[in-house]
Amino acid sequence: MGFRTFTDSGGREWTAFDVVPRAQERRHLERRVMDHLADMIDERRDQDRRVTVGGRSPLASGVTEGWLCFERGVERRRLTPIPEDWQRCSDRELEEYCEAARPVHRAFASPDQFAERRR
């Protein structure tokens, strides 16, 4: 896992690191769909027959090869695919990657991370 810190043009410090799931954590849609269908068949015998198929999990929707994560306080962003040059590019280029990254909801954050957000 690579790790960098950089300061954006607004003077805010960010951390950037790559996240690559282990092979056994990578999910394949076909297997999950088949497992889900088998579960639905068993459940249909006991419950309402109407079935709603939900969305794909994040790992099944394009990030199986990993992502580049940007963090600053409670703010977190995710960029896929991981740019090959992110560990050696300039801070300005890394800031551009950060701006292109998709915001990600954090389930929890420590009080010091909330204080950082107010800056």
Image: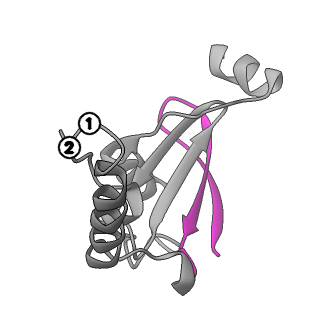
> In the image, residue 53 lies at what x, y percent?
22, 47
Magenta-colored span: 1-22
Q: Which quadrant does the N terminus fall into? A: bottom right
> In the image, residue 116 lies at what x, y percent?
71, 23
Query: What residue is at 59 percent from the left and 43 percent from the top?
Result: 71
Three-letter amino acid code at the position of disc 2: Val
> In the image, residue 78 lies at what x, y percent?
43, 51
> Which residue is denoted by mark 1 in the rendering?
48
Q: Looking at this view, is 95 or 16 the one in front?
A: 16
Residue 15 lies left or right of residue 88; in this view the side is right
Three-letter amino acid code at the position of disc 1: Asp
Q: Which quadrant does the C terminus fall into? A: top right
For mark 1, does the 10 Å Cα neighbourhood hold few (<14), some (14 to 19), or many (20 or more) residues?
Answer: few
Q: How many marks?
A: 2
Picture quarter containing residue 63?
Answer: bottom left
Query: What residue is at 40 percent from the left and 70 percent from the top?
Result: 82
Report the colour scheme. Answer: one colour
For the question of whether residue 46 can be seen, the reply is yes
> In the image, residue 28 lies at what x, y percent?
34, 77
Single out the residue that lies furthest toward the front: 45
Mark 2 to mark 1 CA distance (whole Å): 8 Å
Instruction: Say which element carries label 2.
Output: loop
> Which residue is denoted by mark 2 in the rendering?
51
For the question of whether residue 90 can be seen, the reply is no
Residue 56 lies left or right of residue 93; in this view the side is left
Query: What residue is at 64 percent from the left and 21 percent from the top?
Result: 117
Residue 89 lies left or right of residue 13; in this view the side is left
Q: Identify whether 35 is placed above or below 15.
A: below
Q: Identify whether 44 is placed above or below 8.
A: below
Q: Looking at this view, is 10 or 5 the one in front?
A: 5
> Which tag is nearer the camera, tag 2 or tag 1?
1
